[in-house]
Amino acid sequence: MKHCTTLLWILLFLSLEHLSPAANSNERIVKGYDLGSIKYEQIKVALDAVKSHDKAISYIKATNKLLVIDKASVHQLVQQILQQGAPVPINLIVDIDFANQKMLKERGISIGIGSARSPRELTIHGRNRSTTHQQNTSIKLMVANQSEAQLWSTETALTTAHLHNYDLLPFQSTIKNPKIIKRGKFARPLIRPLGSSMWVTGRLLANGLVEVEVFPVLRYQDKSEKEQLFRVHKVSTKLTLRPGQRMFMAGNSGSMKNFMRDLFASAITSRESTDSLSIYITCQVKKLTMRNRSNDSESPIWQHFKE
């Protein structure tokens, strides 16, 4: 029965593909698209976002082709998805929750309040332009799929010496293979440490889960008072979450737990793990919907979506 259904789809595809396009832009056009090396699972969510009705786009596994029965504007978007390899048109809402704020405050860690007043104090500022919102013990931000954004920056009255014990890489460098700056070999002009920041990047997987990577970046100021950013080499954590699932931010990454222990050295005793900080991460998926706009085959695919 399954083979009969597949055969019917192939016959329908072959018979309808050669029909002449509809004159009216709102009328449905039938056309097939060969996926070639593209995996259907990688673009399924993007296709679901652009189609105008449930049965507009069908995948024929036997021939690795798409059968699209929809209006001209949708065909244009499908072509752009296939040609540009555009990422899934969604945003990720990342929520960092400091669940034990009372304990953190007692140990000299403030969340977005004032400045550090003593060498043992540390202030965490949520900062990502207008897309970051601070609400009591949480920092929220919205980041585009497969993009990176800053979760927070830290300010210390006296930079923790432990943070100098890491190898660094120039952050967001255009050099393909940037040179690693070994610990203790930092360039002499960059002598003023400003603190650290934590960054996040995420992507929606084909199975509906969200893969999130969290990594630290150190901030320095050179002689011209320009801020320089350096990613901490080989320190990160990757988490795979269901949308809405809550998980410890450091995950199971030993490198991230060690870094957080150094960063929050004044707040963690030798017997405590970084889990005692109770810093959680949650991700939600916010799909983008298609705009009602005039056809424009030259415009980037992102212009056809809105939140």
Image: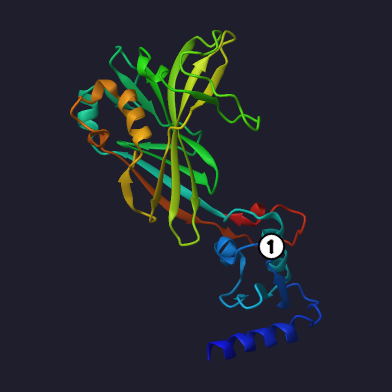
Q: Residue at x 68, y 61 (%)?
A: 82
In the rendered image, the vertical position of residue 272 relative to residue 121, given as above or below:
below
Residue 1 image position (x, y, % from top left): 53, 91
Q: Pointer 1: residues within 10 angstroms few (<14), some, or many (20+)?
A: many
Q: Is residue 292 left or right of residue 139?
A: right
Q: Residue at x 29, y 18 (%)?
A: 121
The answer to which of 174 and 288 lies nearer the viewer is 174
Quarter location, residue 74: bottom right
Instruction: Name the kind of residue labelled 1 in the image.
Output: Leu
Judged from the image, the secondary structure of the residue bearing numbered disc 1 is helix
Q: Residue at x 59, y 24 (%)?
A: 179
How many callouts does the rendering have? 1
Could you tell me which quadrant the C terminus lies in? bottom right
Quarter location, residue 255: top left
Task: Give the residue at mark 1.
Answer: 77
Residue 6 image position (x, y, % from top left): 60, 85
Colouring mode (rainbow / by chain / secondary structure / one colour): rainbow
